[in-house]
Image (cartoon, rainbow, N blue to C red):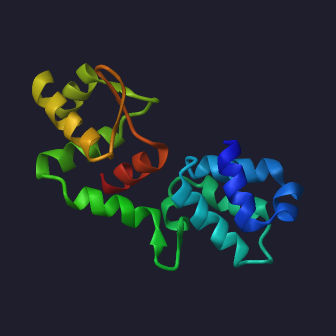
Amino acid sequence: PEEALQLFTRIVGTERVGAEREAALDVVAACGFLPLAIRIAASRLAARRTWTVSVLAAKLADERRRLDELQAGDLAVKATFELGYGQLEPAQARAFRLLGLADGPDISLAAAAALLDLEPHTAEDLLEALVDTSLLESAAPGRYRYHDLVRLYARACA
């Protein structure tokens, strides 16, 4: 979080961030602490002198619109995810979409297999393929999770 805030501050300016530190922390958290997302959000704010950090934080607070808000010029978080998603085989893409609908910080292999209506070994192969493409993370052996922004993209695809 501190490194993310430093990156955001370098782009937006110390004065603007210092006046609204909590809102700035909300922005970088909504960006999932990803440098690309932070750069985009900060660039949008820097280009809009009439916006406050709180205005940007409010725009990013709406999960349904967050990915659409994280684009500036030819930079877009969503476009990065689309590239990876477009390379998936149909079964992998289906698993990616369905797993995005599960609530909670992570999902067990057994729960994922049930959700996908697959045998555990088949589900594990799909999940591991998603880990290999960086669209899913291995939280621990037999447990998987999405980065927050990737989960939003998976839900939008579903």
Q: How many marks?
A: 0
Closest to the observer, 136 or 120: 136
Q: Which of the 4 image quarters holds residue 48? A: bottom right
* Residue at x-position 35% and y-position 42%: 100
> x%, y% of residue 132?
25, 42
> x%, y% of residue 107?
35, 27
Give the quarter of the figure containing the N terminus. Answer: top right
* Residue at x-position 80% and y-position 47%: 22
Q: State whether residue 19 is above or below residue 132.
A: below
Q: Which of the 4 image quarters holds residue 15? A: bottom right
* Residue at x-position 49% and y-position 61%: 67
| Left or right of 48 in this view: 79 | left
- Visible residue check, residue 119: no
- Visible residue check, residue 26: yes
* Residue at x-position 42% and y-position 33%: 103
Q: State whether residue 103 is above or below residue 36.
A: above
> x%, y% of residue 116?
19, 34
Q: State whether residue 107 is above or below residue 82.
A: above
Closest to the observer, 12 or 25: 12
